[in-house]
Structures are given as structure tokens and as C-alpha cells.
Amino acid sequence: MSNDAATTATSRTAGSVSGVGAGSSGSTRPEPPAMGLGISLPPADARAKTEGTFPYASDLWAEGLLWAAILRSPHAHARIISIDTSGALEMPGVRAVITHQDIPGDTSYGRRIADRPVFASEIIRHHGEAIAAIAADHPDTARLATAAIVVEYEVLEPVTDPERAFEAQPLHPDGNLIRHIPLRYGDPDVTGDIIVEGLYRIGRQDPAPIGAEAGLAVPRPDGGVELYVASTDPHTDRDLAASCFGLEPDRVKLVVTGVPGATGDREDPGFQLPLGLLALKTGCPVKLTATREESFLGHAHRHPTLLRYRHHADQEGRLVKVEAQLLLDAGAYGDSSAESLAAAVAFACGPYVVPHAFIEGWAVRTNNPPSGHVRGEGAMQVCAAYEAQMDKLSIKLGIDPAEIRLRNVLATGDILPTGQTVTCPAPVAELLQAVRDFPLPPLPKDTPEDEWLLPGGPEGAGEPGAVRRGVGYALGMVHMLGAEGADEVSTATVKVHDGVATVICAAVDTGSGFATLARQIVQETLGVEEVHVASVDTDQPPAGPAAHGRHTWVSGGAVERAAKMVRTQLLQPLAHKFGMSTELLQITDGKITSYDGVLSTTVTEAMDGKELWATAQCRPHPTEPLDEFGQGDAFVGMAFCAVRAVVDVDIEIGSVRVVEMAVAQDVGRVLNPAQLASRIEAGVTLGVGTALTENLRTARGVLRHPDLTGYALPTSLDAPDIRIVKLVEERDVVAPFGAKAASAAPVVTSPAAVAAAVRAATGRPINRLPIRPQAAVAAVPNS
Amino acid sequence: MTTHAPQTPRSVTLPTSLDEAVAALAAMPAAVPVAGGTDLMAAVNKGQLRPAGLVGLGRISEIRGWRYLDGHALLGAGLTHARMGRPDFAALIPGLAAAARAAGPPQIRNAGTLGGNIASIAPTGDTLPVLAALEADLIIAGPEGSRREIPVAHLLAGRDMLGPAELIGYVRVPLLHAPQIFLKATGRTGPGRATASVAVVLDPARRGVRCAVGAIAPMPLRPLEAERWIASLIDWDGRRGLTTEALTAFGDYVAAACIPDPEPGLPGDEQPVHPPAVLHLRRTVAALARRALGRALS
């Protein structure tokens, strides 16, 4: 292929964004206003981020700062016999060395289970576990000094196979079983005429944030400390830090700096705690910037999962019973694995009606890298497996894969295997029909040769004769907000002064667009165009973690309530004066008018120089934990997605190129079309990575190639054309604005769709993600 | 200052000629030469390398271009991959141009040099199988203006090493005026390191086919018997095409030569087989070699 052709292909793939969904649904509505909900308001920080002036945590600076470095274990499982820090302390420029002996407060931490030592004292449980930290006057001095700490290990046999964790010696005083859910729903003796079975494996995906972890700790004169970090859950991280430092929570302040992308729990407290301890010990500001390798070692990964499935169906392809065993490798520490397991078990049958379900799920401890919250956790792994099972049923019964799914789809009012009734909109059939009916992309032979982009890339080895096209479908579902009784609450404050509104809410915008949404909500409610969103710190009331789409719902709801309270404060005197209720007044473009046009004034006039403040909370209806048989109303809401993947596979070499992903999604209501499209595109691209390349490899628990050369993220050439075919706007009545979270559903569904398409192209079973080239090869008929 | 800044090297020299560069290296044996820095600086950033001094080769204009020399092209070691990928270069040495275009994203190709690719001796270096198939020679500059010439294969195999204060100055490549193909298999559609690569070069004057397989061993492998066998089948004076069966046999021959069957076990034992990943690699090499020769002859 010529160089020019390569360039054309690059720009075509990288630049193509379909406007089908947002564009066409917008055209049926009246002319959208210039502000408020439903418009594509650009993010306020877009310019700064594009120009490189946006301050990320790694850009922070303080006068006289010291640099920190962390000594990490080279072994996955070992006993520490001795730690000698004297060599490091003697090095010129080293200001402090801390180990487990220097922790004034709790020596263990964990966002959900406090089972993880800040510094290992006796046992090393995973590769890269922190042992000591150093503060020095130069980053290289700090790093070199870590090498001068002498640690004597007794290397132990690592437990890296989760199936062996059950019989293995306990790796932790809490035992190796983190959680077991035996879900029982229906009659165990029922069987179907048709039975298909499968064993599936999902690899270890890393969130791989483009900006590695970084932070700055500044000691306060009162003995407290301020942490400047890119946290996504500032109040929880603050509380963990305070208990580790042995301080009252109000003496520790966490200031959220620019977050360089997050697809899970962005910051590992394992970075923040040593940083704060060093600042308290030295009395100097201390900065830490993780290397790429440390970043891979430190933060939580997606759970590698082993899934065994047996689907029973009748002759028409209707599901009768699903039996499954799910084994999640939690790594060395508990973190959020119990929650991930609940999602995996609850959604193990997918968005299908299943009369009888018996799902056995375990999350176990191993000496592998720690697993935790990564977008769509639990739900993603099971989606890949149950959709593979649906494909098997489709082949066995000779029913079209879209048709067999349509015969089983869930709808509002149906019951999940957890016994929970689906009360929210569940337009699953509509989503699937939309992606099925969308025209297929042209075959390479129908397009000009210089536009071809074959598997293997523009300079790759792709040969048209060996390329087969495959089309695959997947349906996925994901829960929104925290599950199983988690107290989901957020508090927001809205202030208006001089025609300018300010939102104060501790909801961290991880790039998911909450800050933009908050501006739109206030514009919509108060008719004020200029809205600022204050930066986040822990002096503000908590808003909870940025996960499971909760900020759109909970924090967005809190902002709306606060804005409405301000609106009432603003309009009450006017309404009173004219003897009408505030509902009869409306605010548009900074003008207040009454329904009959008698009253017309501006917001600025009505304010009369006053400052109006209001604070409100939003707390969705409570949920309950799953009981001993996996039953209970555990989820506040659910979102659904259908994806049709089109792939080209070079069946000799096994290279796969995803040509197009057609997405239809249940979004409740479109609040910002451009932002919504970008969230879906990001989710699909992440899913393509899960399906094809992203697997953090280990050998006996030790990470191999912890860098972005060895861990292949999708590039613009790997990203397919993403067609947003349909956005179903069926409002969820319990959600503020009726909107559902949009980021996680495509992450959950896309990998299964890619696998289904490769299955269709090659005729191979594809039971492992990411798909290895040797799994995608097939015999080429002699041409 | 950033955390990624290495300890500032005590000396940075920026010579403007090859002999000055050699002199700078001789004067400070601990200094490391740096051209594009795409491998070196990655190692520095990872903390694996802390050079005491650097000799920057970027200002030596004599090694940044190429010229003709008795039926050969004399390529400066400072040629970037981006430069080698351009059409004028591709008309001259198409195989090297294809390898240069396949080597990483544009940012890397703009900085990374031919000499650097050779000096790094990474198994996945994309230009290496092409240079091996072309049987290129390296012209090495040494102290006091001395020059010596060694086959590139000798350096890659470790038979001959760069001595102290020696630099790769030029690469001498024969101009064959015939098709050359470089193909590589990677793990993704975007730029990536080769899992296997194959270079096939036709030499009609000597009626030879030369093939090298990269990325599967520490250095490019030459399946010499397969080359001789397939060259004997080609009708060099007429249509050069071969049958599909012959191309397939060539691919299998190359793959079996580069990834031989495991040593047979004791008599009576089952014949050991390669693990699936190795078998797949062998299939990949066979497919690449078959495709490359097919394209070269078409």
C-alpha cells in the first residue's frame, strides 16, 4: 500500500464520528436553546487541556519541596526477614526514610475492606507492594536511595491460579475467600431440550491512565497536612489518610487537582499515604510522580475471570435455565471485589428473561496484581460469556443470532435472577433492532483499493484473499450507582451574585463531563449564562466517588435542587408583589417574565445586588444487600446497550481489525449530545482494547512488560468507525432529568460484540479475551 | 525540572563531523553517542541508564543523507526513518523504505535513525531483516580518521563489535533494481512491534532470492537453503512468476528453517511438539514469506 493510501486511511478512521444518533434525534425537536440542558456545551477546560496549560497533579510545585520514591517488592510472594534502611539514610540528600514502623495511625487501609498494609511488614503478597518510602532533595537521589535499602526476603511459592486459592495456605489473615455468592432462583431440576456449555477466560485489563499517578503533600503549621492529588473519591481518600496519619479528619485536607483521565478508582491511596507520612515527618512539601511501571504496579486492574456456563433452552431458542460458575481473581487484597462479584452474579444471565438461574460466584485472593474498580467491572466479564453462549445456541438451533436474542430480551417489569423487578425503562429489543437494521459497511472489494485498511495496518502484511469479514451482536447491561445498600448521597451548593452563578460540589470531573453538566443544569434552572464550577476539596461536603455514573444522577440531582431553591429565593419576592406563584414566572436569557407578560424584569434587577445561596442534597431510594441466595433489590437503576461489531480477520495470521461498531444505547435523556457521543466512543474504544490487545501479562505473579509498548492500548488506527445508531430517550422517572449514566454500558458490551464478530468470521469458538492471534486463524480454502 | 529528567550529564558534546564525534568519544570513553534517542532516552527515563556524558550526532550533516558509490548507495547512519520512507528513497531501496514506514508512529519515525536501529540491535528492529537480506555493509568510523568495513550480519550476530570510540558512519547497500518486499505481523492495526517480519529481496543479476526473518530471534535469520531452492525454480529471463504451490512450499521451508521441529525424544517416546504459540508463530512466518515472495514476483 502506498504512503498516501496510509495517510488517507488514518484520517478516515481517526476522524470519523457518526452524527446519526444525536443529529437525527435533534432534528425532530424544536430549535435548541443556546444554553441549558440538551445542547452541546463544550467543557470549560477544553481550551486549557488542548493548549497544554491545564495543571495536572504532576505539574504541581511548592517552594523547597522534596521528592519521594517508593521501594517496591520485586517478588510476588515472600516473607520479609529484615529491612535495613541505614544505607539509604546515609546518602547525601536523603531527608527521611519510612517503613511500616513509622506509621502513627492505622497500618492497614482499604476503600471497602481495610486489609492492605500501607507498607509491607512481614509478608509480601504481590509484585510491587510498597515496603518503604524515601524523601530526598532530588527525584533521582530518592530513586537511587531506594536501591540502597537492603531487604532480605524469603521467597515463597506464589499462588497465581485462582482455582488453587481455595486449597492454598491462607495468603492473608482474612483467608483466601473474599466473597461467595450462591445465587438460587427457580427450580434446580428443570432442564431444557437444548444445552450448550462453555468455559471462558477474561484477561487482566489495566486502566492505563495516560497521566500516571502524581501528588504533592504540604504540611500545615497546625500539624495537619494538605494532599494535592487527582483523587476521584476525595472524602474516602481523606478519611483513609487521616486514620493512617493518626489525625482527626479535619486536620487532613485533600485538594483535587486536574485529573488526567480515569476509568476506575483513579488514585491508589498507596501513593497518597506515603506522601503524607513523608510530609509530616520532614515538615517539608513532598512530591511524588509515579513512573509508568509504578503506575502499572500500583493501581487496581480489572478482575481476570474464569467463567463456566451451561445454558438450557427449548427448541424455539427460549432460555429455560442458566447455570454458571464465576471465579474472580481479586489479587492480593479485597478492595472492591465484593461489589464486582455482586454485579457479575446479578448480571450473569444478561438482559434476558431467564426463569431459572443458578449462579455460583467467588472472589478469591491470589498473589497476582490487585484487582478493583474498573469501569463496568463484573458486568463486562459475564457479558463476554453469556453472549458467547447465545451465539452457541444460535448455531446449535440454526436461528439467526439477532433473532435468538430478540426471543429472550428483558423488558420493563421482568424479573432479574436476583428477584429484583426491572422498574426502569429497559428498551432492549428496540436497541437490538436498531443495530440489526442499520446498513452494513461496504466490503473492502466494494471500496477503492487505496481506502483499504486491512488487518495488520497500513504497512502490515494483510492480504485481501485471506481476509474474512464477520458480524457479531452483543447486548449488555450495567448497574448505576453503588449497589447493595451503599448510602448514595451528594451535596451541592449553588450561589448567584451579579448575574454569575457558582456551583460548589465535591463531585470530581474525571473527564466524564460532570462540571459541564452542572453548568448546564444551573443555566437551565436559573437562566444565568455564566456559571462557574468551583474546584473540589474536602472542606466541601462529600459527594461520593466518581463511579457507576453516579455524579450525573446524584450530584446532578443535588445541583438541580440547590439551583431550584435559589430560583425560589429569587422569584419569591416578585411573585409575592404581583400576587402570583413562582411557577408562573419564567427565566430565559437573564430575563424574568410572567406567564401573561405583565411582569418583565432582568435577573440582575431582581437580585438587587444580593447574593443568593442554597445547598441541597440528593439521595436516591435505598437498596438492599444480596441475601445468602443472591436475592435482593440491590441496584438503584440499570442501563442497557446493544452493539453490532463488524470485523475483518486475516485468518492466516489471526490479525483482527474492527471495521465498525454500531451502538444503540438506553440513555434516558440526552443532556449534552456531543459529550454523550464522546462518552460512548470512549467506551467502545476501551472495549475494543479489552477484546483485542489489553492484557497485563504476568509470569508467576510478576508483571511482564509494564510499559505502553508491552501493554498495547488502541491507537486511532485501531479505533473503529463508531456509529451511534440510536439513543433511546425513555426517561427514567426516578432519575433526575430522567437521564441514565452512559459511560459503562458500551464498555461492558463492546468486547462481547467483537468476540462474536470474530467468531462469525473464523468459525472458531473465541472463548478467551483478549483474542489471541492463534485463536482467530482458520483454514484458507485453496484459491 | 521534572521527575523524568536524568541527572544532568556532566558533558554534552555536539560535534559537526564524524571525526569530531569519534574524537569526543575517545576523549570521554564513558560518554554515550545519541542520535534520535528513541531507544536511549526511553532507557534513561526508566532509570536503566544514566550516561555520564552524551555525544549528540544530530548536527553531523555528512551522515544525514545518502549518495551513489559504484553501484551501491552509501546511506548515512543519521538518516531518519521518515526520510527513508519517502518515495524517492523507496524507488531506490524499496525494502528499506517499507521497513522504515512500518517502524512505529510518525513521532518515532521522525527522530529514529538507521544507525540507531542497527546499534540498538533490538530483535524487533524493522530495518534489520532488510539490511540482512540486502547483505549490507557497515562503514565504521574510528579514531584518527580510520574507517573499516564489516558486513551488517557480523555486527548483529556479535561476531564483530563496535570498539571504543567507534561509530557507525555509513551503511553500504547494493542497488539491485528489482522488487523488495518487507512484511510484518503485529498485535494491532496501529503501529506496534513486530511479532514476526520477513524481508524478501530479488537479485536478478546474480539470479538470487534473499530472505531474512526478523523479530523471532535475537537477530535476523537467513534461510539460505530455502533461498537457493526457490531461486533455482524461478525463470529469471522470462516471467518470474511461481505457482501457488511453489510459493506455499517456500513459505513452509522458510518457517521450518527458522523455527525447526523440536529435537526428537528418546526412541519410543512421543515426538515432542511445539506449544501452540510457537506453532502459530511458525504459521505466521510461513504466511509472511509466501506473501512476500508472491508480491516480489508479481
Image (tube, coloured by chain):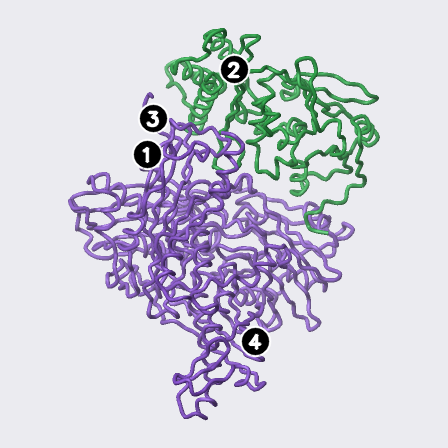
Chain colours: A purple, B green
Residue positioned 35% across, 56% down in the render = A665
- Tell which residue pokes out farthest to the front in this image: A597
Residue at 55% across, 56% down: A268
Q: Amino acid at mark 2?
A: Pro
Gap between marks 1 and 4, in whole Å? 60 Å
Marks 2/4: CA distance? 75 Å
Q: Can the viewer see residue B262? A: no
Q: Position of residue A444 (x, y in %)?
A: 38, 34
**Label 4 near label 3: C-beta < 8 Å?**
no
- Residue A21: x and y in percent read 37, 55
In the foreground, A277 or A122 = A277
On residue A500, the disc is 4
Q: Nearer the viewer, residue A342 or A209?
A: A209
Specify the subunit that label 3 lies on: A
Alpha carbons under labels 3 and 2: distance apart: 25 Å
Q: Which residue is mark 2?
A: B223
Q: Marks 3/1: CA distance?
A: 11 Å
Residue A710 place in picture, x, y as percent: 53, 39
Report the side of B84 relative to A39 (left or right): right
- Name which residue type carries label 4: Val
Distance from the alpha carbon under mark 3 to that under mark 4? 67 Å
Name the residue tied to disc 3. Answer: A779
Q: In the picture, which quadrant includes the C terminus of chain A?
A: top left
